[in-house]
Amino acid sequence: MYERRALIQSFLFRAGWGAAQCSRLAGDASFRHYDRVVDGTRRAVLMDAPPPREDVRPFVRIARHLHALGFSAPELLAVDEDNGLLLLEDLGDDTYTRLLANGADEEALYALATDALAELHCRPDAIPAGLPPYDDERLLTEAGLLTDWYMPAVLGRPTDAAVRAEYVALWREVFPVARVVPDTLVLRDFHVDNLLLLKRNGLAACGLLDFQDAVAGPLTYDPMSLLEDARRDIAPLLVERMKQRYLARLALNHPPINRMVFEASWAVLAAQRHAKVIGIFTRLCKRDGKPIYLEHIPRVWRLLEAAVEHPALAGLRGWLDRHIPRHRRTVPSP
C-alpha cells in the first residue's frame, strides 16, 4: 500500500499536480478506485487501476476515440499505462443516478442518452480498428456466471456438467438472432451510474464514463443496458418511447431496422446481460466481500423473466423453469 501511494504521488508530481489534495471519490465493482484531485481552482479525477488486475489501456483508447468523434468522455490529462494511473478531466457530480434521485426530469435525461447512442450508432467510424468483437465465446463466458456462481450459491451444490452444457447449447442457438442487427461500438455499461449531465450544448451534454470494456457488437446492446437497468425500475411506457425515439433518430442516417428483428435481438441480449449480472452480483458478494449488490437481484430476475418470454427464448425459459424454478430465484445469503 505504501509503494502504491508513492507511485501515485510521483505520478501527480510529474503531471504538475504534486501539491494537490486527494479525497476518495468512488470505488466500483472492479478493482479500480477514483479520487478527486484539487489544486487551488483546478480539479481532476485520479483513476487508480492497479495492474495486473486492471489495465487502463482500453480506457485510454476508447476515451481518445470518443473524443475524436465529438462525444463527452473525460479528457486525459496525464497517463501512466504501466502503473495503471490516469489523471482525468473532472466532469462533476451530476450523474444521472444523483439527478434522478433528486427529482430531475427523467424523460429529458433518458432522451439525451438515447439520442447520444443513436448518433454514435449512425457513425460509420464508430468502431475503432482492432476493437475486440462481442463474439459468442465472450457472451457465453458472461452468461455462464449464472451457472457458475448464482446456482451453487442458492442451490447449495455445484452445477451439474450436463445441465451447464445444455445451457450453453441453448445460448449458442439464439445468439444468431441477436446478430441480425448491425454491429457498432458497444460501450457495455451504458446506464445511469455511468452518465452525467454536463453544461454543454447538444449531445455533448451527455457525459460518458466506464467504457473500458467496449467491444464491437449488436447495436441493440447499449440501448437495452440503458433501459433495462439492474439498479432502478423504469416505466414500460418510457422504455417504449425511448425505443421509438432511438429507431427514429437512427433511421435519419441509417437503413431502417425492422421492429420485430430489433425486438428479438434486444430480448436475446437482455436475457444474456441479466443472467450475467445475477452471476456477477453473486460473485461480488461471495468472492469479493461486496454484498451491497445483492439487493438488486430480485429486479434483475424480473427483467430476465420478462426477456425470456420472447418466443426466440422459449428453450432458455424452459431450462430456467426446470433448473432454477421460481421459488429458488432468491437472493443468495451474504
Image (cartoon, rainbow, N blue to C red):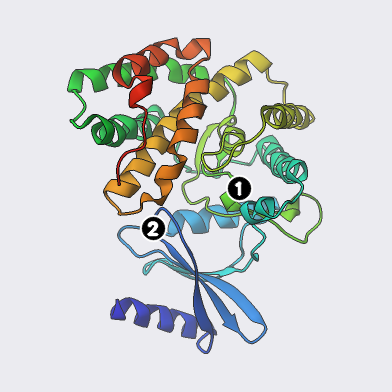
**Residue at the bottom extreme of this rendering:** 19
Q: Is residue 144 visible?
A: yes
Could you tell which of marks 2 and 1 lies nearer the N-terminus? 2
Percent x, y of residue 205? 74, 54
In the picture, measured across the screen, residue 41 lies left or right of residue 217, that is: right
Find disc 2 in the rendering and name its residue. 55
Indicate whether 219 appears above or below 86: above
Say which quadrant the N terminus sits in.
Answer: bottom left
For label 1, the crowd category at 10 Å Cα-Cα, with few meaning under 14, some 14 to 19 and many 20 or more, is many
Percent x, y of residue 81? 42, 66
Find disc 1 in the rendering and name its residue. 192
Which three-letter amino acid code belongs to the residue tagged 1? Answer: Val
Which three-letter amino acid code belongs to the residue tagged 2? Answer: Asp
Write down the quadrant of residue 318 in the picture: top left
Foreground mark, 2 or 1, reads 1
- Identify the element where label 2 is drawn: loop
Give the residue at x 72% y 40%. 119
Give the residue at x 50% y 77%. 23
- Identify the element where label 1 is drawn: helix
Percent x, y of residue 108? 77, 44
Q: Is residue 134 visible?
A: no
Q: Which mark is residue 168?
A: none
Percent x, y of residue 292? 41, 51
Give the residue at x 74% y 51%. 104
Indicate whether 292 appears above or below 298: below
For label 2, the crowd category at 10 Å Cα-Cα, with few meaning under 14, some 14 to 19 and many 20 or more, is some
